[in-house]
Image (cartoon, rainbow, N blue to C red):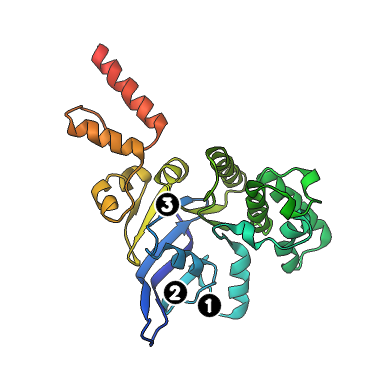
Amino acid sequence: MEAIIETKHLTHTYSAGTPFERSALLDVDFSAYKGEYLGIIGHTGSGKSTLIQHLNGLLKPTSGQVLFQGEDIWADPKRTRMTRFQVGLVFQYPEYQLFEETVYKDIAFGPKNMGLDEKEIDRRVRSAAYFVGLRDDQLDKSPFELSGGQKRRVAIAGVIAMEPKVLILDEPTAGLDPVGVESILGNIRDYHKAQNATIILVSHSMEEVARSVDRLVVVNDGKIPFHGTPREVFTHGDELEAMGLGVPQMTRVFHRLRQMGVDIDPSVYTIEQAKQAILSKLGKAVK
C-alpha cells in the first residue's frame, strides 16, 4: 500500500529550553495509506492529539519530518498551506468554532479561502451538507439555531467541503447520545466509501474504533508501541489495560470465556463477530 501521509523520526517538545519542557512525541514513525480508514487510540496525554496536529501543519516538528504524498510539508510555505487544505482536521467539539451568519456561509468558509469560484463553492457546500445529513432548508438558518448534533454536522461539513484527501476527526462523537453517535459514524462511513478518502478517526471508545476502522495505531507516552488490524491490536488486552485503554466489551467477555475453559476464539471485538462465533460453536456442539 502507498502511504499518503507519514512521519519519520517525528519528535515534538513543548516549551523546549524552559523549566516546563515536556516531550510529547519521541522518534515516531507513522503512516496512513490511500483510501484507508485508520483509528488512533491513546489515553489523555498520550501524544495522539499532538501527532494529528502535525499531520496538517498546525504544529512544526522539533525534529523529524512530516511527508504528504512523499514530500516534506515544511519544504516551503506554499506546500505547508496546500497541505492544510488537503489534510482536513476536525477538532473535538468543533461546533464551538462556528461563527458565520448562516450554515451555508460556515460550510463555504474553507472553499472560499481556497479561491474557488462561486459555482464550485456552491457545489461543494451542498455536497458536504448531503454527506453529513443536513437538509437544504437548513442551509439558510443560523448555525446557532440548530441542535448540538446538527452544529457538529455543520462543523464537519465545513472541513469536508474542502474535499481533503485525508480527513482527520478528533473524537467526533464526544458528548453525543447513542443515536447521534451512530448517525455521525454512519455519515463518516458513507463519505469514506463515496470519496475513497483516507479517514483517520481518533477516539477513546474501543467499541467505536473496533467496528469502524481497518487498522489501529496505539499511542502511548509519545510513542507507537504497536499497530495492526483491530483483531491484532486487541490481542494485546493486558498491555492496553496497563495503558488505561482496555479492550471492547465483547473482547473482554470472550477472553473470560476462554479463561473458563470454553474452546472459543477470543479475538472477537464486535457484536456481529460474537454472534457468528457463538453460532459456530453451537453448530459444532450439535454435530
Q: Look at mark 2 in the image and give the residue it sits on.
A: 65
Could you tell me which residue is drawn at 39 percent across and 51 percent down? 216
Element assignment for label 2: strand
Q: Of all residues shown, which one is farthest toward the left? A: 261
Q: Is residue 70 visible?
A: no
Distance from disc 3 to disc 2, alpha carbons, whole Å, reads 27 Å
- Residue 179 picture quarter: top right
Q: Mark 3 and mark 1 in contact? Answer it, CB < 8 Å.
A: no
Density class for disc 3 (Cα within 10 Å; few <14, some 14-19, many ≥20) is: some
Provide residue 39's location: percent of width, then percent of height: 44, 52
Query: In the figure, 197 relative to 49: above or below?
Result: above
Query: In the figure, 287 relative to 242: above or below?
Result: above
Could you tell me which residue is drawn at 44 percent across and 74 percent down? 65
Q: Look at mark 3 in the image and give the residue it sits on.
A: 204
Amino acid under disc 3: His
Q: Mark 2 and mark 1 in contact? Answer it, CB < 8 Å.
A: yes
Provide residue 176's location: percent of width, then percent of height: 55, 46
Q: Look at mark 1 in the image and give the residue it sits on.
A: 74
- Residue 88 picture quarter: bottom right
In the image, taking residue 207 as reference, residue 105 lies left or right, namely right
Mark with earlier residue (3, 1): 1
Distance from disc 3 to disc 1, alpha carbons, whole Å, reads 30 Å
Q: Mark 3 and mark 2 in contact? Answer it, CB < 8 Å.
A: no
Distance from disc 2 to disc 1, alpha carbons, whole Å, reads 8 Å
Mark with earlier residue (2, 1): 2
Could you tell me which residue is drawn at 77 percent across and 64 percent down? 116
Provide residue 69's location: percent of width, then percent of height: 52, 65
Amino acid under disc 1: Trp
In the image, taking residue 267 as reference, residue 159 lies left or right, namely right
Density class for disc 1 (Cα within 10 Å; few <14, some 14-19, many ≥20) is: some
In the image, taking residue 168 as reference, residue 44 lies left or right, namely left
> Viewer-nearest of labels 3 and 2?
3
